[in-house]
Image (spheres, rainbow, N blue to C red):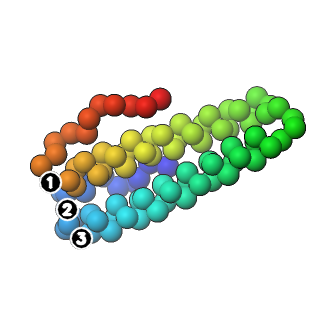
Amino acid sequence: MVPNYPLDPSDSMTADEQWIRLCDDFVNLEAQCAVLCELLSCLSRRDLPLDQAGKHGVDLYSNQLRERLIAFKQQLYKTRPGEMEPPNNSSC
């Protein structure tokens, strides 16, 4: 789920190309967040507890999503003028 292109888009891309790539990444990320929210909503309405394989799947998907969010944040900071590195304030 991490992008398959370099995280430093400034090397060979114009500002317009960087912006288009960031917009595409955001749309993809938003869709993945929506899937996770729908999954958690469905799980909360179930009468049965989640089995071990299901828990592992939710953990795996949420960890991949968290990594994608970190990569996206880094992309944003790299394309933002005057910023060198994102602040180090992880939330989980």
User: Could you say which disc has been placed on residue 12 in the image?
Assistant: 2
User: Could you say which disc has been placed on residue 64 in the image?
Assistant: none
The mark tally for this picture is 3
Q: CA distance from mark 1 to mark 2?
A: 16 Å
Q: State whether residue 79 is above or below residue 48.
A: below
User: Could you say which disc has been placed on residue 16 in the image?
Assistant: 3
Marks 3 and 1 in Cβ contact (< 8 Å): no
Of tags 3 and 1, the one toward the viewer is: 1
Q: Secondary structure at mark 2?
A: loop
What percent of the width, then of the height, locates residue 7? Answer: 30, 50
Q: Label 2: few (<14), some or many (≥20) within 10 Å?
A: few
* Residue of label 1: 81
Q: Secondary structure at mark 3?
A: helix
Q: Residue at x 14, y 54 (%)?
A: 81
What percent of the width, then of the height, locates residue 88? Answer: 29, 31
- Residue 15 placement, left or right of 56: left
Q: Residue at x 71, y 32 (%)?
A: 55
Of tags 2 and 3, the one toward the viewer is: 3
What percent of the width, then of the height, locates residue 78? Answer: 22, 50
Tell me the amino acid under the disc marked 1.
Pro
- Residue 5 placement, left or right of 2: left
Tell me the amino acid under the disc marked 2.
Ser
Q: Secondary structure at mark 1?
A: loop
Q: Nearer the viewer, residue 60 or 12?
A: 60
Can you name the residue that lies furthest to the left here? Answer: 82
Which is nearer the N-term, disc 1 or disc 2? 2
For residue 34, what is the image quadrant? Answer: bottom right
For residue 62, what is the image quadrant? Answer: top right
What percent of the width, then of the height, locates residue 53? Answer: 75, 33
Q: CA distance from mark 2 to mark 3?
A: 12 Å
Q: State whether residue 77 is above or below residue 91.
A: below
